[in-house]
Amino acid sequence: MTGARQLTGRHVLYILLVGFGIVFAVNGVMAWLAIDSFPGLVSKDAYREGLEYHRTIEAMRAQEKLGWQVDVAVAGTGNARAVTARFRDRDGHPIGGLRVNAALVRPVAAGSDRQTVLDETAPGDYRAQVVLPALGNWQLDVEAVRRDGTQWRMERSLWLR
C-alpha cells in the first residue's frame, strides 16, 4: 500500500493525551458545579428533629384552621434587607398586637444566622431591617404569637442575590 498513513507511537500518545484531557476537563467542570451548588446543610441534631415530625404536622393543621392570610417578603439590595410580614384574618381584617420574630438562617455556614423582631408599623403590618453577612442561600423562619398564645409559623427557602 502506497500513500497509506501509518499509526505510529506518536499518534497513539496524542490520542491518549487528548482523550484523557477531555475526561479530566469534564470531571473538573462537574466537580466544580457540584461543589458550587451544594447547600451544605447544617443541623445540630438531625435525629431529634426527625422525631418532631408528627408534632410539626399537628401544628401545621392547627395553623391552617386559623385561616390567617400572611404575606412575608424580604426586599432590598445588597446585604441590607427589609423583612416584612402582613397578617390578615380569615375575613381580611388586620391582625394587630402580635409578637413577630424572624430568623434568617444560613444553611451552608454555621454562625451566620440573624435573628430580629418585626415591629408593627401599621395594624397587621410588621417590618424589620437586617444586615446579612453574605448573599446566597438562606432560610427565613417567621413566628408570630398572639397575646392569647395562638402561634403561627412559616419557613421559606430564599436565594438572595
Image (cartoon, rainbow, N blue to C red):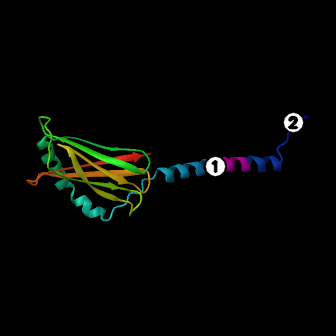
Label ID, residue 13: none
Q: Which residues are magenta?
A: 16-25
The residue at the far right in this view is: 2
Residue 4 lies left or right of residue 144; in this view the side is right
The image quadrant of residue 161 is: top left
Q: Tag 1: Cα neighbours inside 10 Å, few (<14), some, or many (≥20)?
A: few
Label ID, residue 25: 1
Question: Which amino acid type corresponds to the residue marked 2 in the rendered image?
Answer: Ala
Q: Does 88 sit above or below residue 108?
A: above
Comparing 137 with 43, the one in front is 137
Identify which residue is drawn at 34% across, 61% down: 43
Give me the C-alpha separation between circle 1 and circle 2.
Answer: 33 Å
Residue 128, percent from left and from top:
29, 50
Identify which residue is drawn at 38% across, 64% down: 111
Residue behind mark 2: 4
Does the stretch in magenta take in 19? yes
Residue 45, percent from left and from top:
30, 65
Residue 40 lies left or right of residue 14; in this view the side is left
Comparing 40 with 138, the one in front is 138
Identify which residue is drawn at 19% across, 53% down: 56
Residue 136 lies left or right of residue 130; in this view the side is right
The residue at the far left in this view is: 148
